[in-house]
Image (spheres, helix red, strand yellow):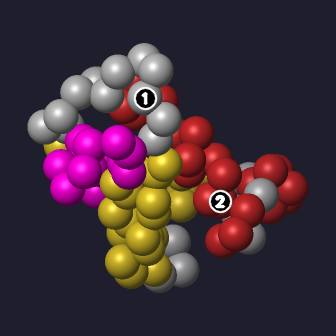
Amino acid sequence: MRWYLALYDEAGDAMYPTLRLTAVYFAASGTGGLDLEHHLWYPVEVCIRDTVVIRTRILARRLKLFHRLRQFRGPWGLKQPATSEEIRLSAA
């Protein structure tokens, strides 16, 4: 499970600038983020040589809160190897 979360974290780091949540923003505002709720499903194993794409959908967004769904896409056909659903809070 640790490596699934690490891959999702890397995808999140790439996504934040599109939401204007940059290192400059966090330094200037003195805020950070945390997960209020996090669900992870991984019914199919991802192997070390598998190439994956992580797709993120923002389901809801408020001033300090957002709800997102992230899914692995890879060589497994219709089987979904992992899904992560989070409710994330920006905190000062």
Asked if the magenta segment contains residue 76, the reply would be yes
Residue 84, image x, y percentages: 30, 50
Disc 2 to disc 1, C-alpha distance: 25 Å
- The residue at the point 40 percent across, 33 percent down is 5
Is residue 39 in sight in this rendering? no
Residue at which label 2 appears: 16
Mark 2 secondary-structure assignment? helix
Name the kind of residue labelled 2 in the image.
Tyr
Residue at which label 1 appears: 50
48 shown above or below 51: above
- The residue at the point 35 percent across, 42 percent down is 75
- The residue at the point 66 percent across, 71 percent down is 19
Residue range (magenta): 72-87
Q: Residues within 10 Å of mark 1 (few under 14, many from 20)?
A: few
- Quadrant of the image occupied by residue 88: bottom left
- The residue at the point 20 percent across, 56 percent down is 78
Is residue 9 in sight in this rendering? yes
Mark 1 secondary-structure assignment? loop
Name the kind of residue labelled 1 in the image.
Asp
Q: Earlier in the sequence, mark 2 or mark 1?
A: 2
| Apparent side of residue 61 relative to residue 46 in the rendered image (left or right) | right
Q: Nearer the viewer, residue 33 or 40?
A: 40
Q: Nearer the viewer, residue 73 or 1?
A: 73
Q: Indicate which disc residue 72 carries.
A: none
Residue 86, image x, y percentages: 33, 56
* Image quadrant where one finds the N terminus: top left
Q: Are marks 2 and 1 in contact (CB under 8 Å)?
A: no
- Quadrant of the image occupied by residue 20: bottom right
Of the two numbered discs 2 and 1 in the rendering, the one whose residue sits closer to the viewer: 1
